[in-house]
Image: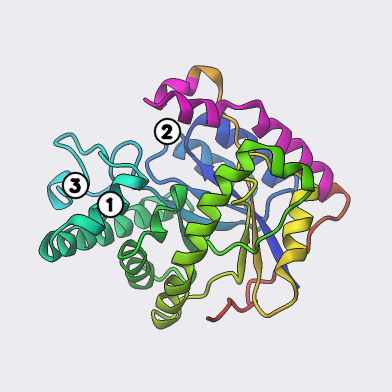
Amino acid sequence: MKFFINGDDMGITAGASKSMLAAWAAGALDGFSVIANGDALDEVQAGLLRHPDRPARIAVHFNLTEGRASAPPATIPRLVDAQGVFRRGFVSCFLKGMFSTSSTWNEVLQQVEIECRAQIRAVRSRCGARALQAVDGHNHIHMIPGFFSAVAKAARAEGVPEIRVSREPFYLATALDLFRPFWWINLVKHVLLRLLSRKAARIAAAEGLRFPRFLVGVLYTGRMTAARARRGIAAAGEGDGDVEVVFHVGRSDANEATRWNSRGLAAFHVSPRRSMEYDELLKWRSEGGAIRPTDSSPGSSP
């Protein structure tokens, strides 16, 4: 079984990007997902140029909930305010699909595809000769029914061959986690994403897109350790296709917290736990803790 280690939120701030680039340069990350409207795309571009011969599996971290859009606001009025700033969170987007008229929802999905294509192009413009290998979603936003189809169509149209299907095997790293509130909160996300992944996998296959067989990193979001990663990989079992393991090793600086209006989001991005994940990952990889997939390794099928 092959698996690879990915870092989410690359480019969101300079502080987060520097630590992620350091982990990648040290061989601890196989790749990362770049957020197109982050504050530090220049940092990402410079980091890639400093290491032209080091492989990097680069994905677009599709974002519909934070900051300014990449497409002109006039082309996506259902997604942004008059200044081009995204105006909905995950729950609001999810409910929009449930309670909108079919004509309104079709407009929303058309605009999601427009914005996704714009974000793919924005990230590609910073990667030089490096190819984009995948699209995934900031806070798994791409997994919302309807959104996944729009993102898959955008990926295919832009020549991106893979999409993340947020399907994680159920596992418990230790029985003590049953007494930790964070695990129960993440379990709700895990169950919802597993339900959504059934249709998403079929859509990805119909669009001719590869996708990892499993994703590891939902149940322990923000609290990943080497032991928890190994337990998740074991739970994935043997099978065709890669397993994607997500660590959040990019810690933003305290003075960058003003980027987020939400105190909770700011705390998540500047949390010292991100530094702990960084240390855990470097230690694990220095001990030979992963097998890198080849560029030609096949994706999963439903």
Q: Give the range drawn in magenta.
A: 256-285
- 283 falls in the magenta region: yes
Q: Does the magenta stretch include residue 44?
A: no
- Please provide percent x and percent y for residue 273: 67, 31
What color scheme is it?
rainbow
Residue 101 in picture, x, y percent from top left: 13, 61
Q: Residues within 10 Å of mark 3 (few under 14, many from 20)?
A: some
The relative height of residue 36 versus residue 135 in the rendered view (above or below) is: above
Q: What residue type is labelled 3?
A: Pro
Task: Name the spot of residue 300 as percent of width and height, x first.
Answer: 58, 77
Q: Where is residue 277 in the image (x, y as percent from the top left)?
A: 71, 38
Separation (CA) of disc 2 from disc 1: 29 Å
Task: Tell me the quarter of the picture where residue 183 sits.
Answer: top right
Q: Mark 1 points at which residue?
A: 95
Q: Distance between the residues labelled 3 and 1?
A: 25 Å
- The image's mark for residue 39 is 2
Query: Which quadrant: the N terminus?
Result: bottom right
Element class at badge 3: loop
Disc 2 and disc 3: Cα gap in Å? 18 Å
Depicted 225 relative to depicted 59: above or below = above
- In the picture, measured across the screen, residue 228 lies left or right of residue 157, that is right
